[in-house]
Every structure is written in structure tokens, then in C-alpha cells.
Amino acid sequence: MRIDIITVHPELMESPFRHSILKRAQDKGLVEVNLINLRDYALNKHRTTDDYAFGGGAGMVMMIEPIALCIETLKSKNNYEEVIYMSPDGVLLDQPLANKLSLCGNMIILCGHYKGVDERVREHFITREVSIGDYVLSGGELGAAVLCDAVIRLIPGVLNDETSALSDSFQDNLIAPPVYSRPAEFRGWKVPDILLSGHEKNIEKWKYEQSIKRTKERRPNLLKGNNLK
Ligand code: SAH
């Protein structure tokens, strides 16, 4: 998978892709992430990518011309399945969407700034608009990093132990059970006996019950998607 991220602040996005699982995924050749500086596609020598809003009002708008040139240049070299715009009014990112995008071909992610992008960009170039939550960020970069992290770790082969993604929260519409590590007792706080019992079947049953209990307590809305009582 190739992910091309269009941004006016490429340096802001470098670090998340240089560490841990996202770095390993690139090292393994499972994903290629490119940070594309929108200013390289600006039409004037000042590398301007934003302008005043027609009709007035506070805040600048990202102009259509550099974005159109950038997207069309990328498309002339590669095929893309999705051109995503990060936007607070987009579809809320959730695990099913991350799963879906992890199986997708190449994608472009456009990061907005200021008041956002000229509406005609959204109408004519964008295939999907994604929000990372009901709050407003100052730019799409952090949202794009969140989206990429959620998606890339699900690309087959990225995680060493494939089952570890399957047992995460939200897969199967359930919250993950609590987890413990050594020591078995700390300040008198004990790890549940069952986890030390060695009875694999009983442990699996306990984990499943804990998942359901947690989901009922914390995210009852998820259970509606299941046949669980
Ligand atoms: N005026 C816009 C907000 C613009 S915020 C409005 O009221 O809807 C500037 C940019 O930050 C947006 O273009 C978008 O790319 C990004 N952004 C802000 N909040 C976001 C969110 N919750 N999820 C994804 N991207 C977001």
C-alpha cells in the first residue's frame, strides 16, 4: 500500500512514521508513506496555498489550484483507490473503517488547515471524508497520523503476532479484557487467580466474559451490533 499525505507541514508528520510499528511496516515494505509538501505545487513564487474566503469572514481557505495540481500529478503516476480529506464533519473513524481501509489499495490523504479547503476540492477530488472525533484540530496532520496508525497496524503482515490485532478492542464489537503482567502480586494487589491457573479453556472463557462485562459497562452501543445478550 502506498499512502501519500498532502500537507503544508510535512515536518510535523515525520516523527510518527519513524518509530515502532509504523516504521517496521515501512521497513518490511508493506506500506510506503510519502509526505508531499503542498507548497511545491503552489502557483506563485511565494508558494502560497491559501487565500481569503469569498463572502468574507475570518480565516483563510486552502485554494483549489495547488491541491488540484498536486492530486492530478500524483494520479498521473500512481493508481489510488481513495482520496481522503481529513475533516471534522467527515465520517467518524472507527475500527470497521480502519479494517476496511487496511485492505485498500493506494490512498491519498489531504490535510486541511485554517478554515479548511475550497469546497470544490471536496466535491470533485475527494472520495471519502474522515474525522477523528467531534472536536476541531488546527490542521489535518495529527488526524492523518491517527488514521494511518489505525490502518497500517492492520495491514496483513505488519504485526508479528497477527492475532494480537484481532484481540484488540472493537474487533468483534467488544472491548478488550483487562491484562496483567509480572509480578503476580504488587502491594497486595493480586492478578486474578484464573490467569495463573494454566487452564487455557477457562482463561479464554474468563477473558470473553470480562470483554462482555466491560463492553456492557463502557460501550453498550457496541453490543447492539452483536447477538450477545
Ligand atoms: N472550519 C472547519 C474546521 C477547520 S480546522 C470547520 O468548522 O469544520 C482545519 C483542518 O483541520 C480541517 O480542514 C481538517 O483537515 C483538520 N481537522 C480539524 N478537526 C479535525 C477532526 N476532528 N478530524 C479530522 N481532521 C480535522
Image: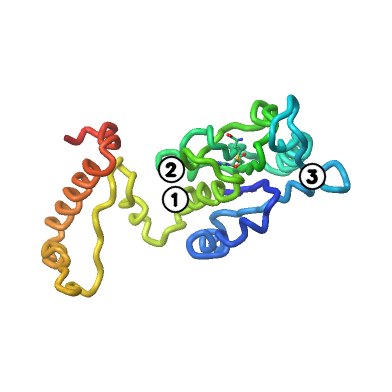
Q: How many marks?
A: 3
Whole-number angstrom distance, CA of label 2 to CA of label 3: 32 Å
The residue that appears at 77% across and 39% down in the rendered structure is: 66
Residue at (43% x, 43% y) in the render? 99
Residue at numbered disc 3: 41
Q: Amino acid at mark 2?
A: Asn
Q: Amino acid at mark 3?
A: Tyr
Residue with the most extreme right position? 45
In the image, ligand 1 is in what quadrant?
top right
Q: Which quadrant would residue 50 be assigned to in this image? A: top right
Residue placed under numbered mark 1 in the picture: 154
Q: Secondary structure at mark 2?
A: helix
Circle 3 Cα neighbour tier, 10 Å, few/some/many (<14 / 14–19 / ≥20): some
Residue 8 is situated, as x and y percent measured from the top left of the image, at 70, 49
Asked if ligand 1 lies within 8 A of label 3, the reply is no
Please tell me how crowded label 2 is: few (under 14), some (14-19), or many (20+) other residues with Cα within 10 Å.
Answer: some
Say which element carries label 3. helix
Label 2, on which residue?
99
Q: Residue at x 49, y 42 (%)?
A: 132
Image spot of residue 134 (x, y percent) = 47, 38
Do the residues under discs 1 and 2 have CB atoms within 8 angstroms? yes
The relative height of residue 21 versus residue 68 in the rendered view (above or below) is below
**If the image is split into quadrants, where does the C terminus sit?**
top left
Observer-nearest residue: 67 or 87?
A: 87
Left-right relation of 88 to 42: left
